[in-house]
Amino acid sequence: MDAEIFTAADFLAYTLGIIVYFVGMSLTDRIRFLRDYNIPEPVTGGLLASLAILGVYLAFDVAIGFELETRDRLLVYFFTAIGLNARLSDLVSGGRPLLVLLILTLGFIFMQNIVGVGAATLIGQPAAVGVLAGSASLIGGHGTAIAWAPEIAAHNGVPNALEIGVAAATLGLVMASLLGGPIAKFLLARNGVSKDVGEVPVVGIPHDREDVEQINHINIMSVILTLHIAIIAGWFMNIGFSEIGLKLPLFVSCLLAAIILSNTVPHLLPKLKWPARTKALALISDFSLGLFIAMSLMSMQLWTIAGLAGPLLIILAAQAAAAVAFILLVFFPLMGRDYQAIVLSSGFAGFSLGATPTAIANMTAVTKSHGPSPKAFIILPLVGAFFVDITNAFAIQIFLSL
């Protein structure tokens, strides 16, 4: 007998997503393990909600689902905000380390898919599962995995693509948090390197600053208007891409449109108060990402991936081994074998298997114990803000078409 299906309307799902986020935040405040391993609040709350829904399914044979139109809009908001914060001038001023980091990251995207597809094929899974457990969920994170899941489910024979992608992204965050510190410790013990003595960290804003931007309804409305203009431009750009046979998720087109606008409009209209890198934009970006992840995780139907639990762990173990080998044998030597390279190595473990916030958390832990490395905190987020998501979209499409 089939399970009874209950589908919550979009507004109810939106409201529950906020509740789930606050539950995750409360648990993170109370449980030290979650803080120590930098597990994001929406991940904690979302996973707990999905486990509760699994309990309902097992106990009462009721499958709870959600309408997620609002969640999908939040994804577009978040990636558009990333594009608005990206400055080409910062890429130029970053110098050789930034260029090397960018090249290595773009190359690693393709390597990650090769490992994923290869491991999936060896254990008898569809190649698309390897892509999901590759750059779509790891270097791409929850957002990219969820954005590509409908496409993969519809055209690549993986009906539970969303659950696989989100599960892989979540496990990737855990691996990323666990591997960054040990990699840095190993490299510090093995290599006698000098540290950036005399420099100060560039993470965070001092509480005693008098020029900290105040958030009010005016700058919030300004950010929303700017985001909407960029989204509209991205929507038209997406139509243009489709006309020439290039199918990309809407969030990629909006990201690209926002990058173009943010690097042209402020120069053409210097008197215009462009909201890039403002606290108001950061607030909307954080809200969008946090609620997006909470809604995505709480909507996982865990019973649909029970048969893939073993294969998924095998693929992710291969990905972790490949990432560690790449960092030790390729990344660290090419980044210069110095202290900055060690800090960036810990960050790259977080970035390549988890997300940019995980990378920052890894690097912060290293620098608190062994000394600051300010440039590392500048160039790694820049790489994540520019070409990674666009290149990842192309890479995913290439591997899915093979």
Image (spheres, rainbow, N blue to C red):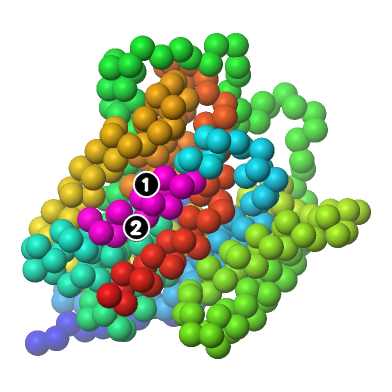
Magenta highlight on residue 109? yes
Helix, strand or loop at label 2? It is helix
Name the spot of residue 269 as percent of width and height, x first: 88, 59
Name the spot of residue 171 as percent of width and height, x first: 27, 50
Residue 110's label in the rendered image is: 2
Q: Residue at position x 60%, y 36% from top?
A: 95
Helix, strand or loop at label 1? It is helix
Task: Look at the image and tell me whether residue 295 can be seen.
Answer: no
Quarter holding the N terminus? bottom left
Front one among 39 and 192: 192
Chief secondary structure of the magenta portion: helix
- Badge 2 amino acid: Phe
Task: Look at the image and tell me whether residue 338 can be seen.
Answer: yes
Quarter holding the C terminus? bottom left
Magenta highlight on residue 39? no
Question: Where is residue 144, by image quadrant?
Answer: bottom left
User: Closer to us: mark 2 or mark 1?
Assistant: 2
- Badge 1 amino acid: Ser
Q: Residue at position x 66%, y 38% from top?
A: 93
362 left or right of 98 in image: left
345 left or right of 83 in image: left
Look at the picture and state if 282 lies above or below 374. Answer: below
Question: Where is residue 169, by image quadrant?
Answer: bottom left
What range of the chain is rendered magenta? Answer: 102-115
Residue 352's label in the rendered image is: 1
Look at the picture and state if 362 lies above or below 301. Answer: above
